[in-house]
Image (cartoon, rainbow, N blue to C red):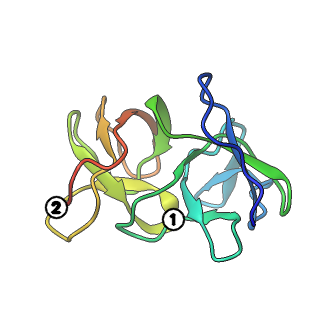
Amino acid sequence: MPSFQRPRRDGANTIPSAVDWSGGYTNGGTVAPMQPNPVAIDINGSGQAALCAIGAMPLGLLQDFPKIGENARYENDGVLRYIAGAAITAGAKLTVGANGYLIPAAGGGGVVVAKALYAANQGDISTCEYLGYAGTV
């Protein structure tokens, strides 16, 4: 059985990582000096954190840079940072796109997981209200 912690009041949830995210966030080949690396993650078949599939319901948004086997810290409630996978308008409903980035939810059957609090361009790190499952589009 996989070893991961249930959500706590302070929002610090962890699960072993199947991916090495220690290189950080890259935009155009440049590693950005930022923490956390807010991509959407889910649990893979081995019970480890991996990138969430496009349009799927994520476990939450990654909050650190773990290496393979280290605990990945994630959040799945409240106001969180995310990476925009496309141009986003303030108030847009968001779903998971490629690379675990969030994109506008638009009729493709994806799960709505968040609401954008600010406009963002593709590749920007912005802020959303994480909703969990909020229907499909």
- The residue that mark 1 highlights is 52
Q: Quadrant of residue 20?
A: bottom right
Furthest toward the bottom, the residue is 45
Q: Which residue is mark 2?
A: 137
Residue 123 visible within the image = yes
Name the residue located 23 percent from the left edge and 33 percent from the top edge: 90
**Label placed on residue 104:** none
- Please, what secondary structure does the residue beneath circle 1 have? loop
Please tell me whether mark 2 sits on a helix, a strand or a loop: loop
Q: Earlier in the sequence, mark 2 or mark 1?
A: 1
- Please, what is the three-letter code of the amino acid marked with disc 1? Cys
Residue 26, located in which quarter of the rendered image? bottom right
Q: Residue 108's spot in the image, x, y percent? A: 19, 71
Q: Amino acid at mark 2?
A: Val
- Residue located farthest toward the top when viewing the structure as drawn: 10
Query: Could you tell me if residue 86 is visible in this image?
Result: no
